[in-house]
Image (cartoon, grey):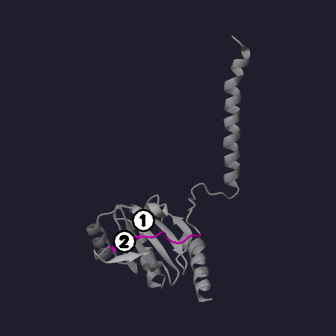
Amino acid sequence: MNKKHLFIPLVVFLGLVAVFATQLIKNSHGDDPTKLESVLVGKSVPEFRLEDLAEPGKLYDQEIFKGEPLLLNVWATWCPTCYAEHQYLNELASEGVKIIGMNYKDDRTKAVGWLNDLGNPYLISLFDGNGMLGLDLGVYGAPETFLIDANGVIRYRHVGDVNTRNWNEKLKPIYEELLAEAKQ
């Protein structure tokens, strides 16, 4: 048996250690491994035609995202994190933050009941029962929130719940910047 063959596993192991160490160092310098970039940031909301959640037959398209900056919040009744963020969304809406909701891959009757019971922070509630708009947006699950400018362009994607901390630290400054841009 050739002794050189004994070193092959060692060389492979050391190579893997080097790769993993490089990734750990890179992530410790500010890269967030949980951050999911969207290829749509900087692009218009994709074309769609969806029904209103509470009024089947009433249709909306991407034009609802033009005119003023707003949030698009993707939510579902099967999502426990959506339940946790819902009260905070109601607070934001009461403070004047414009939010459009997109009920994602859900039961319409349960979703309407949810809004009736827990309050409705949404200017418009879209029903994406088959998840096609969610797919076009690159949604991984609920909740996700997109900040959209007055021209209907996606400017930021937030994965996870909207809460006091991430609203004040990240989302609010971007939203306020979009409001200021819209006034120019």
Q: Residue at x 54, y 67 (%)?
A: 157
Identify the residue position indicated by label 2 in the image. Answer: 50
> Rounded to the nearest whole Å, what is the CA distance between mark 2 and mark 1?
8 Å
* Outermost residue to the bottom: 183
Q: Quadrant of the C terminus?
A: bottom right
Which three-letter amino acid code belongs to the residue tagged 2? Leu
Q: Secondary structure at mark 2?
A: strand
* Outermost residue to the left: 109
Q: Main SS of the magenta segment?
A: loop
Task: Give whichever of discs 2 and 1 has the lower sequence position.
Answer: 2
Count of all numbered marks drawn on residues in the image: 2
Relative height, residue 56 to residue 94 (above, below): above
Q: Is residue 131 magenta?
A: no
Res 162 seen here: no
Identify the residue position indicated by label 1 in the image. Answer: 133
Q: Residue at x 70, y 52 (%)?
A: 26
Q: Are marks 2 and 1 in contact (CB under 8 Å)?
A: yes
Q: Residue at x 43, y 67 (%)?
A: 74
Relative height, residue 99 to residue 133 (above, below): below
Magenta region, residue range: 42-52
The answer to whether 7 appears left or right of 175 in the picture is right
Where residue 3 sits, quadrant-wise, is top right
The image position of residue 82, as x and y in percent, is 41, 66
Res 9 seen here: yes
Q: Which is more toward the observer, 141 or 135?
A: 135
Which three-letter amino acid code belongs to the residue tagged 1? Leu
